[in-house]
Amino acid sequence: MAIHIRRREFIFTLGGAAAALPLAARAQQPGKSPRIGFLGATTPTIWSPFVGAFLQRLRELGWIDGRDIAIEYRWAEGRDDRYAAFAAEFVQRRVDVIVTAGTTATMSVKKATSTIPIVFASAGDPVGTGLVASLARPGGNVTGLSNMSTDLGGLRLELLREVVPALYRVAVLGNADSLLIRLEMEAVQAAAAQLGLDAFRLEVMKAEDIIPSIEAAKGAADALYVCSDPFLTTHRVRINTSAVSARLPTMHAFREHVLAGGLMSYGPNFPALFRRSGDYVDKILRGSKPADLPVQQPVKFDLVFNNTTAKTLGLTIPESFLVRVTEMIE
């Protein structure tokens, strides 16, 4: 069983008459509890800490599920093909706000409604993917929090090079069906070139592609960069078991991968992002419009490291790296 040792912080949810109402008017209808549609990209188990942080913030703001609000959950389990049906269901059920996380999920909901407020608790490159017009002035019915997935590639590669000094060739694993992941892969390759590294893509579109792709990288890459894709997070055990077998150190965006045997992750603290999404929901339920609520960026980042995996791979980790680790998995 993994032991989690906390260290110091590393700074560095729809149609019909209701859907036709103005956003502020929808938030002020008397005599009924607002309904929130919550669209999860993976599973309740994986997202338990995120949902917990979201619900805690809502309670602090006076919204208790089952008393003041009613939350309806739908879980895609890493399958992007489920988003459209769930979005249409929320529209049909006339929810008051939809909370999402993940760019693909949010894009699907945005296609389903232009009137119901949408809050994304985490999305990569919301401007580049067309979710919002700009961070400061989102426009439309969508706002939320960016996870900066296309902006952190260079830093992640630098961290990876600290523990793999001979790093040169990096395999970049991603779901080619996702617009965001294609953008992320491009950004990682560009960052690698600036660092004098050679990054090449391993494009997967279904679970059965994962193991053969990673096996093909054995001997051809010095490390594996796993993109910030809910599909890949759902299959994190398969990915990291295969990577260790192929003797490939891994870099991830999500802590959950490190708990499943990945070497390390660096990225936003996702419970903190989900907590902050509760503030958006509160403001919208009290009459604010998403178009007037700027998209925010992360303020807290975590570096999570699996020391057991490092030992299995025979890596010697410098103390200068270890002192910056937020959470060590032994």
Image: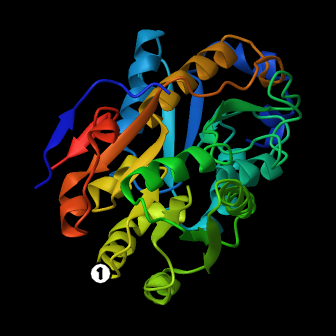
Vertical placement of residue 12 versus 83, above or below: above
The picture places residue 280, in percent across and down from the top left corner, at: 63, 21
Under mark 1, the amino acid is Ser
Picture coordinates of residue 139, whole percent (x, y): 88, 28
Q: How is the image coloured?
A: rainbow
Q: Residue at x 33, y 77 (%)?
A: 247
At horizontal 22% and vertical 67% (from top left) the residue drawn is 314
| Relative horizontal placement of residue 40, taking residue 142 as reference (left or right) | left
- In the rendered view, does 311 fall on the left or right side of 23? left
Tell me if residue 66 can be seen: no
Quarter of the image for residue 316 reads bottom left
Q: Is residue 197 above or below residue 153?
A: below
Residue 28, can we see it? yes
Residue at image position (66%, 62%) is 85
Q: Nearer the viewer, residue 220 or 8?
A: 220
**Left or right for 189, reference 130:** left
Q: Which residue is mark 1?
A: 245
Residue 211, percent from left and from top: 43, 85
Quarter occupied by residue 308: bottom left
Q: Residues within 10 Å of mark 1 (few under 14, many from 20)?
A: few
> Which structural element holds mark 1?
helix
The residue lying toward the viewer, choosing from 178 and 191, is 191
Q: How many marks?
A: 1
Q: Quadrant of the N terminus?
A: bottom left
Based on the displayed image, in which of its 4 quarters is residue 223 positioned? bottom left
